[in-house]
Amino acid sequence: GAVVSQHPSRVICKSGTSVKIECRSLDFQATTMFWYRQFPKQSLMLMATSNEGSKATYEQGVEKDKFLINHASLTLSTLTVTSAHPEDSSFYICSAKAGTGTDTEAFFGQGTRLTVV
Amino acid sequence: GQNIDQPTEMTATEGAIVQINCTYQTSGFNGLFWYQQHAGEAPTFLSYNVLDGLEEKGRFSSFLSRSKGYSYLLLKELQMKDSASYLCAVMDSNYQLIWGAGTKLIIKP
């Protein structure tokens, strides 16, 4: 399968600071990228969907000004958690897919564990 | 190295039971996840196992044996809508998710 690289894998930051997470498709062009967060033993929650060159579509209840998503190129999307607080501590996962068709697979990154102290 | 193995494809009959196996070798273990993914859609969480044993949720059950590096997802009373890919993923000691390639499940009437 295709490779999606997510960086960093773990990050600890102070409350009030911002953290940027990168998601790269290494061997394909990702027209669409998904960002998720997952709390321990809970389901994967879709935060937003981004298409290259356009604004991300956020799921209900997700603050777009707090979770900034940029998908400026076909191989890179970034999620910036602004003014992070301890309740933002979670596991963030990206996935990317190459096409827009219904039979196009999405591939996952390794995830980023964010701890806000 | 780290790896997750699961069958590439399986076929089953509507109304039957199917078991999808997953074996893993990772540096540390912080839980095993199963996800369902329909073609072209975002994956959905099915289960999380961190202790040995069977976890049942309706028609879906997941089993884990840490000593054997083995898990399975059991689907009962199969329905046509269960046709999808099933992904096994293990969280290692660095809290990274190691993904299997997925098992494509085909349900026949």
Image: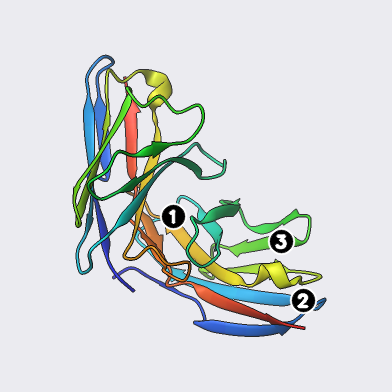
Q: Write down the chain letter for disc 3.
A: B
Quarter of the image with the C terminus of chain A is: top left
Tell me whether marks 3 and 2 sit on the same chain: yes
Residue at mark 1: B29
Residue sitting at 58 percent across and 70 percent down?
A: B84
Determine whether the residue tagged by mark 3 lies in a helix, strand or loop: strand
In the image, is A90 to the left or to the right of A6?
right
Residue B37 drawn at (x, y percent): 53, 63
Residue hosting label 3: B61
Read off the residue under disc 2: B17
Query: Where is residue B11 shown, x and y percent of the image?
Result: 65, 85
Residue B24: image quadrant is bottom left
Q: Which of pointers 3 and 2 lies earlier in the amino acid sequence?
A: 2
* Closer-to-camera residue (B37/B74): B37
Residue B17 at least partly seen: yes
Q: Nearer the viewer, residue A6 or B108?
A: B108
Residue A1 in the image, given as x and y percentages of width and height: 34, 74
Residue at the spot 22% in from the left edge and 23% down from the top edge: A18
Viewer-side label of 1, 3 = 3
- Give the structural element (helix, strand or loop) at label 1: loop
3D distance between C-alphas at marks 1 and 3: 20 Å
Q: Chain of mark 1?
A: B
- Tag 1: amino acid: Phe
Q: Residue furthest left?
A: A73
